Amino acid sequence: MSSREVVALSVGGVRFVTRASTLRRFPESRLARMLSEDNEEFQLVDGEFFVDRDGALFAYILDFLRTLQVSLPADFSDVERLRREAEFYQLQPLAELLGQEHLLKPRLEILELRFFLRETQAFFRIFGSCSSTVERLAEQITVFTAQRWSSPFPSQQPLVPLPLERPSHHDLIFQCGTERAAGDQLVARYVSIKPDTRKLINGVNVLGLLVDTFLKDGFRLVSTRTVSSEEKVECYSFERLQRPAGLAVAVSQSPGSSGAAQGKRSHTQKGK
């Protein structure tokens, strides 16, 4: 790769290195014109283009040029400043995307866990406002079953995985513990929750692992209550703010045009 294909920039004192083709993605933008021979706006200092703008925000500008997506952290609060930077660089598709507040606004995600004990069994039901979160939990949670003689220890029979109950895309149901079968045999159900490798039979232990899993996934516990005094069903409510994983832009360009943008949510996760 020749040196002409690689461009170094110092933006507000922060150094960036990228391909020239990346900066030329939108031909009428300031960054594309910076590489032209008649550039008089940006100075070359020690082989680097000096740009007197916000360096931290330029990282998002450059990421957009590379991917044609806007992916912002959940706690990002400088959307308006970033939009002004996009306008300065004359990246109209990006500025238009950042103006679509209804797509960029974080949404409140709710997760509800219901739990109750009945003798030696524990029952769980998880409801989520976001079906993809419930789908990920269904991939993490595995229930195993085995028959054994009345004993505090599992039999030598291999554990067999059981499918989770899925009444809808937004909830799942499972249980753990033991129940009596024919004769002196017990049917035992164990729960494993990835990445934890343990197989737990005690309902309280499973409850603790579930809560810990939710908290590590960015949820916060907002309330606990008893929803059925007869069966003593405990309900745990969790919330988290989720910013869209990304806004993808479909750009139609012709020579000498800056492009037209249409924004839509991207289902590709860059992080959580």
Image: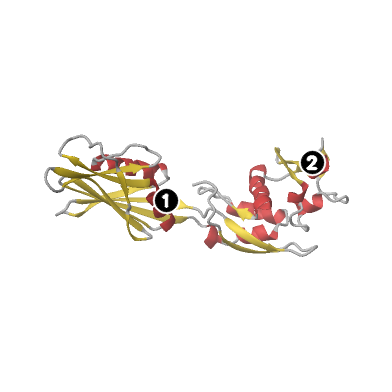
Q: Element at badge 2? A: loop
Is residue 25 found left or right of 80 in the rendered image? right
Residue 271 percent location from the top left of the image: 52, 46
Is residue 110 found left or right of 155 in the rendered image? right
Residue found 42% across the figure and 50% down from its top = 136
Residue found 75% across the figure and 45% down from its top = 19
Residue 177 sits in quarter = top left
Q: Amino acid at mark 2?
A: Met
Task: Tell me which numbered mark, 2 or 1, is placed earlier along the sequence.
Answer: 2
Count residues near mark 1 (Cα–Cα under 10 Å), then give few for <14, some for 14-19, many for 20+: few
Relative depth, front residue between 110 and 142: 142
Relative depth, front residue between 57 and 180: 180
Residue 243 percent location from the top left of the image: 50, 53
Residue at image mark 1: 136
Residue 81 percent location from the top left of the image: 62, 52
Residue 59 percent location from the top left of the image: 65, 45
Q: Element at badge 1? A: helix
- Labels in figure, total: 2
Q: Amino acid at mark 1?
A: Arg
Residue 196 sits in quarter = top left
Q: CA distance from mark 2 to mark 1?
A: 42 Å
Count residues near mark 2 (Cα–Cα under 10 Å), then give few for <14, some for 14-19, many for 20+: few
Query: Does 98 sit above or below residue 43?
Result: below
Residue found 74% across the figure and 61% down from its top = 258
Is residue 255 found left or right of 165 in the rendered image? right
The colour scheme applied to this rendered structure is secondary structure
Residue at image mark 2: 1
